[in-house]
Image (tube, grey):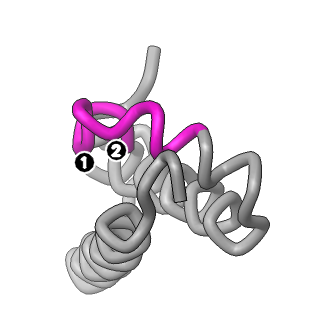
């Protein structure tokens, strides 16, 4: 089961663009991997699977938001046909 805030939940209308960019753009694929890793770490901290300091958890959330913003910018600039 995917952690909450998985990228397909954050951008449900963009599944085709996400797939297209992931296949065609190595940087975008790396961003998705990074997002998944950070999102999993946030989920583990929130669910106390991996106890984390408040400051570290806040930093993880900030990093997740930063990655999501970059993913959103790339999706907005990309069209499936272009």
For label 1, the crowd category at 10 Å Cα-Cα, with few meaning under 14, some 14 to 19 and many 20 or more, is some
Q: Quadrant of residue 47?
A: top left
Please tell me which residue is depicted at 58% across the width and 67% down the height of the picture: 31
The x and y percentages for residue 24 are: 75, 56
Q: Quadrant of residue 3?
A: top left
Number of numbered callouts drawn: 2
Cα distance between the residues tagged 1 and 2: 5 Å
Q: Is residue 72 magenta?
A: no
Please tell me which residue is depicted at 70% across the width and 66% down the height of the picture: 30
Q: Is the C-beta separation of discs 1 and 2 under 8 Å?
A: yes
In the shown orientation, is residue 36 left or right of residue 59?
right
Q: Nearer the viewer, residue 11 or 3?
A: 11
Q: Quadrant of residue 65?
A: bottom left
Magenta stretch in the rendered image: 6-19
- Is residue 60 something that shows in the picture? no
Please give the label number shown on residue 43.
2
Circle 1 sits on which residue?
46
Please tell me which residue is depicted at 28% across the width and 75% down the height of the picture: 69
The x and y percentages for residue 71 are: 40, 67
The x and y percentages for residue 32 are: 57, 56
In the shown orientation, is residue 13 left or right of residue 27?
left
SS class of the residue under badge 2? Answer: helix
């Amino acid at each position: 089961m995917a952690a909450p805030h998985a990228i397909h939940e954050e951008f449900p209308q963009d599944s085709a663009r996400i797939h297209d960019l992931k296949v065609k753009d190595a940087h975008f694929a790396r961003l998705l991997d990074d997002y998944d890793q950070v999102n999993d770490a946030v989920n583990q901290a929130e669910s106390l699977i991996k106890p984390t300091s408040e400051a570290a958890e806040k930093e993880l959330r900030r990093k997740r938001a930063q990655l999501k913003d970059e993913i959103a910018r790339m999706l907005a600039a990309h069209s499936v046909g272009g």
